[in-house]
Structure formats: structure tokens, C-alpha cells
Amino acid sequence: MNGAQLHLALNHFPVVLSLVSLVLLLWSWKFKDFEVKRVGLALVVATGLFAGIAYLTGEPAEDVLEKYPSFSKPLVHEHEEAGEAVTIVSILAGISAIASLFFQR
């Protein structure tokens, strides 16, 4: 498995997990279900972890793709900047979720 394949395999996890965690947290807020809230917060933590891993696999993916003639450095740079911003937000949300889980005890 090369860097591009690994990046593609991993970068969907944060997207899906963030949507699932949002639904669970909204459910727990509406129905006051603390068990569902804990699961939702745990998924926010997992989202941050997977976002960090996906970000770290971006450079190896770029190394594989830059050999192709259709490679666009400006487009990849824009993609990288967006990925960096989302990764930072996801990691901060994960840290906040860890704090929330800790203080709920």
C-alpha cells in the first residue's frame, strides 16, 4: 500500500465519525441520555485521532502523486491548507471532549 492509498483509506474516517458524533450528541442533548453523550464524545476523540493520522499521511500521498503529469501543486497546496485547518479543529474538539469526559465523572 503506497502513501496515496493509505491517505485515501484514512481520510474518510474523520468525516464520517464527525457526522455520527454530531448526531449522537444532538440525540443526547434532546433526550438527556448521558450514555449516548459519552459515546458521542468518545467519537469526537476518535475523530481528532483519525484527523491527525490522515494529515500525517498527506505528505507521503503527495510524494506518490507528484510523479503524474496531471499533478497540480497549487491545488494540492490548497487541499493541504484545508486539511491542516480541519485537523487543528478536530484535535482541539477531541481535547475538549476528553476534558468533558473527565469532568463528567
Image: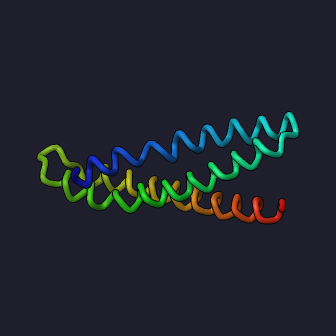
Q: How many marks?
A: 0
Q: Quadrant of the C terminus?
A: bottom right
Say whether residue 46 is left or right of residue 35.
left
Q: Which x, y percent locates residue 17?
A: 56, 43
Up/down of 23 relative to 89, above or below? above
Q: Which of the pair 17/84 is nearer the observer?
A: 17
Q: Which of the pair 71/7 is nearer the observer?
A: 7
Up/down of 17 relative to 100, above or below? above
Say whether residue 96 is left or right of residue 79.
right
Residue at image position (58%, 56%) is: 90
Residue at image position (74%, 42%) is: 25
**Where, by quadrant of the figure, is residue 103 drawn?**
bottom right
Residue at image position (65%, 42%) is: 21
Say whether residue 47 is left or right of residue 69.
right
Residue at image position (71%, 38%) is: 24
Q: Which x, y percent locates residue 15?
A: 52, 42
Q: Which x, y percent locates residue 62?
A: 25, 56
Say whether residue 47 is left or right of residue 22.
left
Q: How did the renderer colour the structure?
A: rainbow
